[in-house]
Image (cartoon, rainbow, N blue to C red):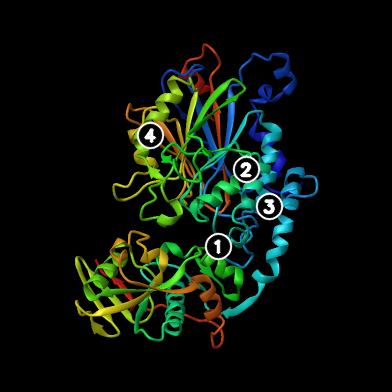
Amino acid sequence: MNRRDFLGKATVGTGLLLLPRLSAAHPVRRARRLTILHTNDWHSRIDPFPDDGGRNANQGGAARRAALIADIRSVEEEVLLLDSGDIFQGTPYFNYFLGEVEMKLMSEMGYDAATIGNHDFDGGMENLATQLQHANFPLLSANYDFTGTPLAGRTEPYRVFDKGGIRVGVFGLGIELAGLVPEQLYGATTYQDPIHRGNEMGRYLRTAEKCDLVVCLSHLGFRYRDEKVSDVSLATASEHIDIILGGHTHTFLDQPVTVANAIGAPTIINQVGFGGLRLGRLDVAFPKKGETRCVACSNLHV
Amino acid sequence: MRLPFAATSALLLVALTGCQRPIGQPAVQPQYYVVTAAIEPDSTDISASRVADLIAPYSVQLEDAMNRVVAEVALPLVKAQPESPLGNWTADLLLAAARDLFPDYEVAFAVQNYGGLRISEIGPGPLRVYNLYELMPFDNELVLVEVTGSELTEFVSHILAEGGWPVSEGLAATRRGTTVEIMVGGQPVVDDRIYYLAVPDYVANGGNDSEMLTEKRQIPSGRMIRDLLIDYAAKANGPISVKSNGSRIKILD
């Protein structure tokens, strides 16, 4: 199928929301649909994988990703583009240019936010702070305390995005650094318990910030055999996180995994492998005013 | 652009039921796109053209150095646990480098942490500099670490507990349930003897949960592992055809 044909078909049934003139004529009308696009662990994979007969030969690549994102933006009104960390390290672009190209590319593609992966420390914190000059999007981390480091004041715990009236709270959580990242690279950074901080952020974004949707950008890893905190254990212990966009374990989930949270409500976990091989997409539809949840569900079932 | 679209997932609807949402309960419809050559941008893709223009001045600086052919790979160098051709090849190159770099020490064996090898296969075909950058992107230094036989046993037990890391010739380690048997240079480990192991400084400094090596005496080489791999891969006599026969790391539980 033609790429644009596909995108056209994918939006059948939501056409009204996509007409800009209608939006302009009714400025107070709220959007009922939001498209979240996401990547994780793209690891400096700027060119496609080498065309050498390997498993991922000639796949991925920033220019193709940019084309795809631009196509989706051309038909979807409200798009959030997010990344779950490990932007850096993996190809000579990082060794030579220290993350400058990655940050410029993500800015050009219009990323709204990213969190910090363990390999984003690989050039040191001073370097990450330097490369942030090339980024027009925030790095979000709610559980690394950078007080007294070069990153102090350079990151934010969360951002609230107003997407056509839908309030989306996005925050970041990072993995424990001790034993994983060389100490001289993370220095005085203090790691805080992700579950505790995740619950604090979720509660705050839902109640104080009145967010309709709470999204966690996580670099904790999808799931572990041992007790190590993961996206699954975070989801299970959380109350207000709707969606966890994960990373670190390079997990290719063909469909998101839904986990019952601490109050029995579903939390969606997604992860799209590594190396920019995939772009994840979640279309979040909110019901019209007066509709109950079940009506909305049956309307949307395919 | 007239190109096929690669893939999307089956449609799945998940209703979110969190409380206190000002505008009602959302439903989520997921899909994903596979980024392949089928979505190759053309000149009508303004965003992709800008991205390509942004990359070009950087990529031109890398091209010549990265495309240099170092050697020829005859059999695919594949990464796997508990041991593999890619792991054995890498660790043997590090051992050869360590023996040249530390002529005054008897190097028992070399170790590379499994997670430190960042690609899953190389070849067959020409081995180029960029392959080795992608295999070992980290700026890790090769160091010697001085350990006693009992510390060596603790470290090798960790390697086994992790499912097996790339190790060079000189080490044969077997785990049966909770029993670990280690031979170094064909001899059992002597607990109070001193051994010298060639490892990345990342591991020597406790990385990948190797805390048993921290505070041990380290002898620096001043050479990055990646650069050593580039130099020593080039020393191959003929095409590289490494096989792994499982004699270095055995996990039998």
* Cα distance between the residues tagged 1 and 3: 16 Å
Q: Do discs 1 and 2 share a chain?
A: yes
Q: Which mark is in front, 4 or 3?
A: 4
Identify whether A216 is placed above or below B90: above
Name the residue carrying label 2.
Answer: A135
In the rendered structure, the residue with mark 4 lies on which chain?
A: A
Quarter holding residue B168: bottom left
Tag 2 subunit: A
Q: What amino acid is labelled 3 in the image?
A: Ala
Answer yes or no: is residue B153 visible: yes
Is the C-beta separation of discs 3 and 2 under 8 Å? no
Circles 1, 3 touching at the beta carbon (< 8 Å): no
The image shows residue A41 at horizontal and vertical percentages of 52, 50
* Residue for badge 3: B38
| Numbered disc in front, either 3 or 2 | 2
Q: Position of residue A207 (x, y in %)?
A: 43, 20
User: In what element is the residue under mark 4?
Assistant: helix
Marks 4 and 1, how far apart at CA: 38 Å
Find residue A186 and report its horizontal and vertical position in percent.
44, 51
Contact check, label 4 and label 1, Cβ < 8 Å: no
Question: Regarding mark 1 in the picture, which secondary structure is present there?
Answer: loop
Residue at the disc numbered 1: A55
Q: Amino acid at mark 2?
A: Ala
Residue drawn at x 73%, y 63% is B60
Q: Are marks 4 and 3 on the same chain?
A: no
**Which chain is home to disc 1?**
A
